[in-house]
Image (spheres, rainbow, N blue to C red):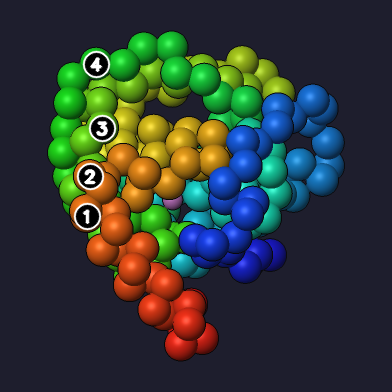
Amino acid sequence: MIRPIVRYGDDVLRQPAGDVVEITADLQSLIDDMIETMYAAPGVGLAAPQVGVPLRVFVADPSVGRNPDGLVVLVNPAVVEEEGVQSEEEGCLSVPGFAAKVRRPSRLVVRGLDRDGEPHEVEGAGLLARALQHELDHLDGSLFLDRLRGLQRELIVRRIHKLQRAGKW
Ligand code: NI
């Protein structure tokens, strides 16, 4: 089931998400829905807070479904290694219509649990490293906008507020 994606301005995007304490049927359907929602958007990643659920779960797929091995599902993820720097244009399904260059590590190793609760480690470079860190940020209540310089961030926030006032957000 495709779930509605919450947008910038919703409090759930700003609160740190809580650890998953048990792998339940509800969690499994949340994960299935998140995968479906991400592909339908389409996007390369989606974190549970973006569908209004404040839990540490995200899905990502830099191939957006084209590569059957491209799908990453992580529960309670944490960074174990990072190196390098990359700076590429980036957007977010919760901030539609806006993009900006964001500095990210060029390689990232993240450890957590898979959808069945088994330990799972994902190593990513390039777009995957970027997506992994972007989704981890969501779990900490942070958005890509927070990683921009003040003025650049201000300009985007001002335009969003204008859209909000016009009822177009
Ligand atoms: Ni995002």
Q: Which mark is residue 104?
A: 3
Spatial CA span between label 2 and label 1: 6 Å
Image quadrant containing the N terminus: bottom right
Residue 159 can be seen, yes or no: yes
Q: Say which residue label 2 marks.
A: 149
Location of residue 41 in the rendering, given as x and y in whole percent from the top left corner: 46, 66
Residue neighbourhood size for the residue with mark 4, other residues' Cα within 10 Å, grouped as few (<14), some (14–19), many (≥20):
few
Q: Give the amino acid at mark 3.
A: Arg
| Residue depth check, mark 2 versus mark 3: number of the one nearer the observer | 2
Q: Give the amino acid at mark 1.
A: Gln
Q: Is mark 4 within 8 Å of ligand 1?
A: no
SS category of the residue bearing label 2: loop
SS category of the residue bearing label 1: helix
Residue neighbourhood size for the residue with mark 2, other residues' Cα within 10 Å, grouped as few (<14), some (14–19), many (≥20):
few
SS category of the residue bearing label 4: strand
Q: Say which residue label 1 marks.
A: 152
Residue neighbourhood size for the residue with mark 3, other residues' Cα within 10 Å, grouped as few (<14), some (14–19), many (≥20):
many
Q: Say which residue label 4 marks.
A: 83
Closer to the chain start, of discs 2 and 4, is 4
Spatial CA span between label 3 and label 1: 17 Å
Location of residue 78 in the rendering, given as x and y in whole percent from the top left corner: 52, 20
Q: Nearer the viewer, residue 82 or 122?
A: 82
Name the residue at 64% across, 51% down.
Answer: 12
Check if mark 2's residue and mark 4's residue have beta carbons within 8 Å: no
Location of residue 49 in the rendering, given as x and y in whole percent from the top left corner: 62, 48
Q: Image quarter for residue 64?
A: bottom left
Q: Nearer the viewer, residue 34 or 66?
A: 34
SS category of the residue bearing label 3: strand
